[in-house]
Amino acid sequence: MTTLLLETLNPAQQLAVQAIDGPVLVLAGPGSGKTRVLTHRVAYLIDVVGIDPFNLLAVTFTNKAAREMKVRLEELIGVDRAAAPAIGTFHSLCVRFLRRDIVHLGRERDFAIYDADDQQRLMRRVLRDLKLDEKQYPPRAIHARISSAKNELVGPQEYARLNRASYYDEIVVRCYERYQALLRENNALDFDDLLFETVTLFRQHATVLEKYQQRYIYLMVDEYQDTNRAQYVLVRDLAARRRNLFAVGDNDQSIYAWRGADIRNILRFEEDYPDAQVVLLEQNYRSTQSILDVAQALIQSGMNRKHAKNLWTENAAGVEVSLHEGYDEHEEAGWVADEIARLRERDSFRLADCAIMYRTNAQSRVVEEALQRRGLPYQIVGGTRFYERKEIKDLLCYLRLIHNPYDSISLERILNVPVRGIGARTEEMLLRWANEMGVPVYQALQELAADSETHPFNARTRNALLAFYDVLSGMIVMRNQCTLLTLLEAILERLTFREALVHEYGPDEADERWRNVQQLANMASDFVNMPYEDQLPAFLENVALIADVDSIDQDADKVTCITLHQAKGLEYPVVFLIGLEEGLLPHSRSIDERDKLEEERRLLYVGSTRARQRLYLLYAFKRTSFGRTNNSTPSRFLASIPPDLIKQSARRQQAERPPHGESTTTRQPVRTQSTLSGTSGRTANQGRQRTNPEPTEIRFLPGQQVRHALFGAGEVVSSKLIDGDEEVTVNFATRGQKRLLASFAHLEKISPE
DNA sequence: GGCTCGATCTTTTTT
DNA sequence: AGATCGAGCC
């Protein structure tokens, strides 16, 4: 078995698998078989070293990755033993810990998990409670602050301590406090709490932490470069006793800084664990040489690469990477769809072999249209998620409420769904009444049902409320006496849900939505083998933690449309990267900060290394966004690719040139890399132009007061020339310190000079 | 209490 | 361009 396990691995992989004791850092380039290494290491620990599977913990980035790991493990060591190791995402593992031990924090184990939509609603409730204007204090923005604070393990008090400066921050603190209080009242945790509370649990209850430290002798963490502070501390604490931490990652694929991921976690590994063994996986098994060359060119033009890897492959050169300019986003998508059809007919690729990747979800719409028009089956990952469809979310709220009646956010959502004559005023009255009595809304309804004398409602309103309460309380009685499916069917029947759909949407749309409901019922039936009382909580947890990528259908022969972020960790024989334009990739929001810009570059790197055999790069000559059409500039990153590595596809002579009136003479010649090269100013469009030619000298000196369109006023801390541009570090009064590229940031000098 | 119309915003990226 | 939200109307 030993030999069998190891002989399919290359020397570096073997080294990683056999590095058992102490901290190990595996720097694994794309396609270098890191999933193989992880899986084989678990198998090796169990089979060869003789570790009890019960003592292993592996953290993956997605549930899908966890599933795949379990499947592969079963193949290696058999079903029985493969079931035992704890394998899952940070969030699902934390839920597991918290269900068991959150009582130590004085909370209940059947807490609800709030998703983005719930968080939004809760935030609005907070603003209403605090009488704050949503215009002045956008719920999203406030919540974003709270969320990143939690990811940094900063609670309300500490946030207040760290941010004394502005009034805005004071508001954030008040909202943060109220937000947490409401979560507690509703017996709910949001996504960020799952991590935060687990860390808190471990910090405050040494015995609990010790229990897990004892149990999990070997820890493995995938995608270590994308861990945030909370995750980092969690891992550090869990590993503190045994120090058997096996971290796998690739700093070149770090693309989640915007949600708190800190690339320094991986860069610091050797400082955190000076005795760490470091293994480099540089052989790529996935891509052709041509694809790898392009990917390497892209990433090597980046700045500040630590742990630079040199990927190589024994794979054949394969087909050249191709670059194509579409006239607009429609032609771009059309070209892709046509090419997919050709690949299927001429080169016998399947549709499932092809993936179309883009920076923003909004781009998927046009792609969808193009595929639809040609009758090519496709699946769009993300976008409007199944669980976020209204009819589904409504039903889920019923289920959540049945499980946890204190969840007032869910209650408010469905109080008048389907319409039963409970309007905003009644709702507000009910909430105020409950508030006055100091009880959860559900309990207020109980009071009302018990014929309380003091309620403020008239007879008609009271009846409407009682109708709602009857449904709910009836279901709560049923909760543990039947299967989840039966429960769901009972809800549908009690609510005459289908009829309500017809009433609200008309017969056609109702049909479509009813099919979604049936699909939900289908999913509910997956849980029939559990004890009755476990089915509902298990289902709800599953729903809350499932990610879009987790539900990619690999069996169907469909084209996959997916964002670059979600594509991390996946691979496809054929990959199309579309919208490679300034403002889109790099995204306009990331354009004037060095670190953000570098992350965009890595995003492109991640995208191109998903491809096994064919890689297509596309951009459009002009693009409509926000209802406005603008000429576009090819992404600066394309300039990093030496021209002999790409085949510029000949532009076809289309019949559909721009409609009359608009002359084609302004059209740019095809911009190959020779014309794309360097940072020299191009005048491809009238829209975004660089304000100054190549800077050759420092224009901003420390102490200079400047103004930025977005960040406001600030003071220059330092400035240096890098790569033909001036990088200015500015300390903004309200936004803190930022590094900006002078040529893009449009910094305005304000006195004193 | 629900409807229609116009104004306003939207698009980063997500567990 | 499309969705969402608020104001004013029935």
Image: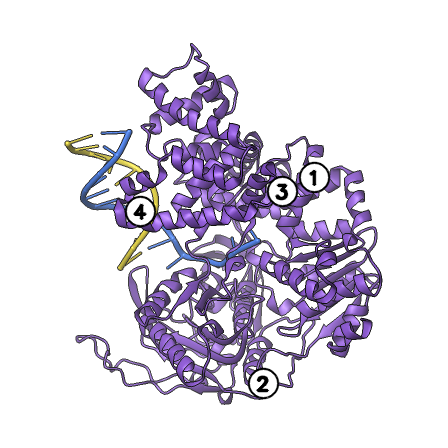
Chain colours: A purple, B blue, C yellow
Spatial CA span between label 2 and label 4: 51 Å
Helix, strand or loop under label 1: helix
* Viewer-nearest of discs 3 and 4: 4
In the rendered view, does A402 fall on the left or right side of A241?
Answer: left
Query: Mark 3 sits on what residue?
Result: A162
Give how far apart the Cα atoms at labels 3 and 2 are: 50 Å
Residue A216 vertical placement versus A633 (above, below): above
- Give me the C-alpha separation between circle 2 and circle 1: 50 Å
Residue farthest along the top direction in this orientation: A453
Residue appearing at x 47%, y 17% in the figure = A447
Left or right, A743 with respect to A273, comes to left
CA distance for labels 3 and 1 = 33 Å
* Residue in the foreground of this view, choosing between A654 and A532: A532
Q: Amino acid at mark 2?
A: Gln
- Residue labelled with disc 4: A510
Q: Chain of mark 1?
A: A
> Measuring 44% from the left and 19% from the top, which residue is drawn there?
A433
* Residue A441 x %, y %: 48, 25
Q: Report helix, strand or loop for mark 3.
A: helix
Q: Quadrant location of the N terminus of chain A?
A: bottom right
